[in-house]
Image (cartoon, rainbow, N blue to C red):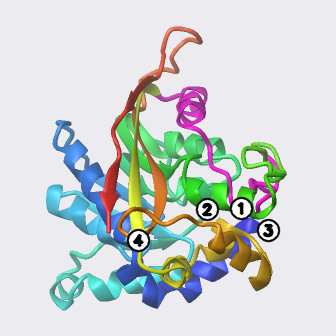
Amino acid sequence: MLQSVLQRSFEAAARSYHDAAVLARETGARMDERLSLTKIQPRRIVDLGCATGDGIRALQRRYPSAQAIAIDYAIPMLQSVRSRSGSFARLTRRGPQLLCADAHALPLAEQSTGLVWSNLMLQWFDDPSLAFREMHRVLEVGGLLMFTALGPDTLKELRNAAGRAAGGRDNLDGTTGGMTGSSRTTASGIRNFVDMHDLGDMLLAAGFADPVMDMEMVTMTYSRRSKFLADQRHLGVRTALLGHRSWQDWRKVFDAWSRDSADRLPMTFEIIYGHAWRPATRPPTGETSVIHFHRREATRA
């Protein structure tokens, strides 16, 4: 149910997404920096959940000779990728190949891809392990998966405000559904996200080797609450992120949202970075582990 709602929302937000995607551009730039530490030269690169194409364009600049594939399940997003590729790229056929597909059923052959890149997509799945298994399938031996996702401390200020608005009765950490259930929303209606350690375990279970997980907190500040809501609507994630509440209920929550010393409204986003490799054979159980890193908080106005 959530996936169909998200798909319609992303389709409707294709025109407004690019200008609102400040956080995605920041995390994408940091992913690109991490690629500088690797020595891979993939023949085929895939941006999974490409949105308007910032990621695939960065990958093409880094790997100009590689076949580039941009995948999204919202056709208007793919149309935006094409329009932003530039007339020269379209005329010379150097723009990315566009595929409309679900991350759970990629139209790619087994072991056909050297790099799978996914920026802020996995958090919308109740069970990201299904997508991890599909990414593992299409990666060639020695291929690299690199991704970001939102973590459970995302929107902690709003979760705390919802708890205060409910008189402290809100279960801010509980979910109304399990990992494979139909919902990961808390009692507050705000979506709950998978922990970094659980994502690392999912990578191992999917057959990946040497997973490295990194996490940092990024705080965005807003001059007014309507700006925060408008950003989420322009990104196409407002309902998926915040759930359904009456305006009267949301007003109570926002009234409880505390301003900082600069009289701005802070909102934390926990950013999880992960990468892992496809080995020649599945690592035996217990012989591999996940390396975790924690980074300090950054603030964005």
| Observer-nearest of 191 and 170 | 170
Q: Amino acid at mark 1?
A: Ala
Closer to the camera in the image, 70 or 157? 157
- Dot 2 falls on a residue whose secondary structure is helix
The relative height of residue 259 versus residue 109 in the rendered view (above or below) is below
Please tell me whether residue 197 belongs to the stretch shown in magenta.
yes
Per the picture, the main secondary structure of the magenta-coloured stretch is loop
Please report contact status of discs 4 and 1: CB closer than 8 Å, yes or no.
no
Name the element at disc 1: helix
Left or right for 54, reference 278: left
Residue occupying the point 47% across, 55% down: 269
Residue corresponding to mark 3: 1
Mark 4 and mark 2: Cα distance apart in space: 16 Å
Residue 262 occupies which quadrant of the picture?
Answer: bottom left
- The residue beneath circle 1 is 162
> Which is more N-terminal, label 2 or label 4?
2
Q: Are marks 1 and 2 in contact (CB under 8 Å)?
A: yes
What residue type is disc 2 on? Leu
Q: Mark 3 vs mark 1: which is more N-terminal? A: 3
